[in-house]
Image (cartoon, coloured by chain):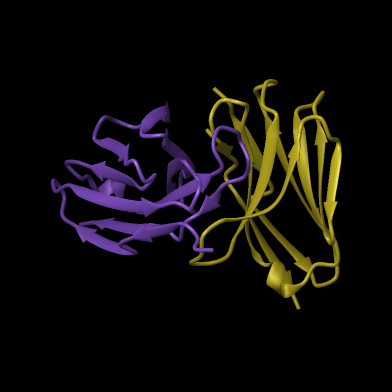
Chain colours: A purple, B yellow
């Protein structure tokens, strides 16, 4: 069965622009979480969506937002990009409700110049 | 909130030796502890996990131990092979909707 699919794989944006990243979870998975991975900060939790509702949120500024659609696909948006937003953005899906291990997508590598 | 610390940050072993990576957590309510392996340029992949009602779990050459009293858990890899070379992350969560706290990662290098 298909894994977690993230698009695009790579992005280069300019400071001040905004960006939208997409994540399609494994079929049947209704929980989608987003993480930012950087060499200095490791894996940091952004937010989690379940049945189109944000259930958990990490400690990121309001420039980072997301949403989930009725088919469980999720998008993440970053507005007014800063150089420090350069990172690998990973999304992960899991079975509903409980904290089973995630299945991660391959990520979107965002570079802000 | 939860704080997960992971040691060492880098670990170099000879092929065939054992490797141990340790993590501590701060929130006694955490009850699920997965380990992920991330090869260079690839996504993290779940390799083993343990719940708080179990003290040890094994899967072939990989084992995880949990000490709830001391709030630490460890990953043990025996008979290491070059393909075990990767970055390993520990994580902790509790029954609140899939919010995981990750350790900072251990870069394991297995020398042939």
Q: Check the image and name the residue furthest to the left.
A: A16
Residue B51 vs B96, above or below: the answer is: below
Q: Which of the image's four quarters has the N terminus of chain A?
A: bottom right
In the displayed structure, B99 sits above or below B86; it is above
Q: Is residue A23 left or right of residue B40?
A: left
Q: Residue at x 37, y 52 (%)?
A: A23
Q: Position of residue B79 (x, y in %)?
A: 85, 67
Residue at 30% across / 44% down in the picture? A76
Left or right of A44? Residue A52 is: left
Residue at (51, 53) in percent of width and height: A104
What residue do we see at 50% from left, 48% from top? A28
Of residues A28 and A102, the one nearer the viewer is: A28
Q: Is residue A59 visible?
A: no
- Give x and y (percent) for residue B87: 61, 58
- What x and y, as percent, mark residue A33? 45, 41
Q: Quadrant of residue B66?
A: top right
Q: Quadrant of residue B30?
A: top right
Q: How many marks?
A: 0
The residue closer to the viewer here, B95 or B88, is: B95
């Amino acid at each position: 069965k298909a894994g977690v699919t993230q698009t695009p794989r790579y992005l280069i944006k300019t400071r001040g622009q905004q960006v939208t990243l997409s994540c399609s979870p494994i079929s049947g998975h209704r929980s989608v979480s987003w993480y930012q991975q950087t060499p200095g900060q490791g894996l940091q939790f952004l937010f989690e969506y379940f049945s189109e509702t944000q259930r958990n949120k990490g400690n990121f500024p309001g420039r980072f937002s997301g949403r989930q659609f009725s088919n469980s696909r999720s998008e993440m948006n970053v507005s007014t990009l800063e150089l420090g937003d350069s990172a690998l953005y990973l999304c992960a899906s899991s079975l509903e409700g409980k904290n089973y291990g995630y299945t991660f997508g391959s990520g979107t590598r965002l570079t802000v110049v | 909130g939860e704080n997960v610390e992971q040691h060492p940050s880098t670990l170099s072993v000879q092929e065939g030796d054992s490797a141990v990576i340790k993590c501590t957590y701060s929130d006694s309510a955490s009850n699920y502890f997965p380990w992920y392996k991330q090869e260079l340029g690839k996504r993290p992949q779940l390799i083993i996990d343990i719940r708080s009602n179990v003290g040890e779990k094994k899967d072939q050459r990989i084992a995880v131990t949990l000490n709830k009293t001391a709030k630490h858990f460890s990953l043990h890899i025996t008979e290491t092979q070059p393909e075990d070379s990767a970055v390993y992350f520990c994580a902790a969560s509790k029954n609140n909707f899939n919010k995981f706290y990750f350790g900072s990662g251990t870069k394991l290098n297995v020398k042939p």
